[in-house]
Image (cartoon, grey):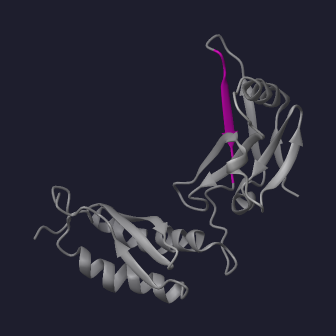
C-alpha cells in the first residue's frame, strides 16, 4: 500500500477545487513525469473519466478520490502534500523525496528504463561537452525518439555520438528497443561543441 500523506488542509483545499469543476470529475490524479531522473516532477491534475487507467491505484480521502498512476506509485512513496493559506490565497506544496531516485528493474516500463540509462550513463558523458539528450517518446514499434540539447545541438559530431555512443549503449542495455532516432533540429549550431 502506498505510504503518502495529504494533510487535512490540503484535503479541504482539493475537495473545494473539485467541487467548483464543471463536467464529470472523478477526483484528482497524481503522477510523476520523468520519474527516477533529475527532471522528475510530481503533478496533480483533475481526473476525468477519460484519464482513468485500469491499473491506477485508487485511494479515498475526505471528500474526494485520488487516482495514482501505477508506474508512478514507487516514486510517490513517502510523498507529502500540504496546503498553507495566506493573504494571497495559499499554496499547495508537494514533496516527493523518491521521485528523482532511480528505481528501475527489468519489469519497469520501457520509457523508465531508457530514461534511467540516458540520465545515469549517457548524459554524464555528454555533460563534458555541455550536451545532453532526452527521450521524446517510445513509438509502438519500440523506437526511442531522442532530442539532443546544449552542446550537442547542431554539433558536427552528433551522428557519431548518436550511432557509436547513445544508440549502442541503449540497444545493449535495453534489447527490446528496435532502433534509436534523433529528431533534433541541428540547423542551429550556435551552441555546438564541435562546429562543422
Name the spot of residue 28 as percent of width and height, x first: 74, 40
Name the spot of residue 85 as percent of width and height, x first: 71, 18
Q: Which portion, as a residue range, is magenta?
A: 89-97
In the foreground, 5 or 28: 28
Residue 120 lies within the magenta run: no
Quadrant of the image for the C terminus? bottom left
Residue 106 lies in quadrant: bottom right
Name the spot of residue 93 as percent of width and height, x first: 67, 34
In the foreground, 185 or 166: 185
Quadrant of the image for the N terminus? bottom right
At a point 41% along the width and 70% down the height, the residue shown is 145
Name the spot of residue 38 as percent of width and height, x first: 53, 57
Q: Tell me if 166 is positioned left or right of 110 in this view.
A: left
In the foreground, 88 or 61: 61
In this view, 168 is above or below 15:
below
In this view, 107 is above or below 69:
below
Amino acid at each position: 500500500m502506498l505510504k503518502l500523506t495529504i494533510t487535512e488542509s490540503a484535503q479541504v483545499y482539493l475537495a473545494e477545487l473539485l467541487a467548483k469543476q464543471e463536467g464529470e470529475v472523478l477526483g484528482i490524479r497524481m503522477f510523476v513525469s520523468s520519474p527516477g531522473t533529475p527532471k522528475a516532477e510530481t503533478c496533480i491534475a483533475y481526473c476525468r473519466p477519460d484519464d482513468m487507467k485500469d491499473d491506477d491505484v485508487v485511494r479515498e480521502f475526505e471528500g474526494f478520490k485520488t487516482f495514482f498512476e501505477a508506474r508512478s506509485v514507487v516514486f510517490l512513496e513517502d510523498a507529502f502534500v500540504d496546503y498553507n493559506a495566506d493573504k494571497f490565497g495559499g499554496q499547495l506544496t508537494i514533496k516527493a523525496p523518491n521521485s528523482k531516485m532511480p528505481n528501475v528493474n527489468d519489469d519497469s516500463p520501457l520509457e523508465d528504463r531508457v530514461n534511467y540509462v540516458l540520465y545515469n550513463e549517457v548524459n554524464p558523458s555528454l555533460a563534458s561537452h555541455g550536451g545532453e539528450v532526452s527521450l521524446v517518446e517510445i513509438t509502438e514499434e519500440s523506437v526511442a525518439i531522442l532530442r539532443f540539447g546544449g552542446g550537442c545541438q547542431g554539433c558536427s559530431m552528433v551522428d557519431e555520438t548518436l550511432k557509436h555512443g547513445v544508440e549502442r549503449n541503449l540497444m545493449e542495455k535495453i534489447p527490446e528497443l528496435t532502433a534509436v532516432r534523433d529528431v533534433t533540429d541541428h540547423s542551429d549550431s550556435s551552441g555546438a561543441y564541435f562546429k562543422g
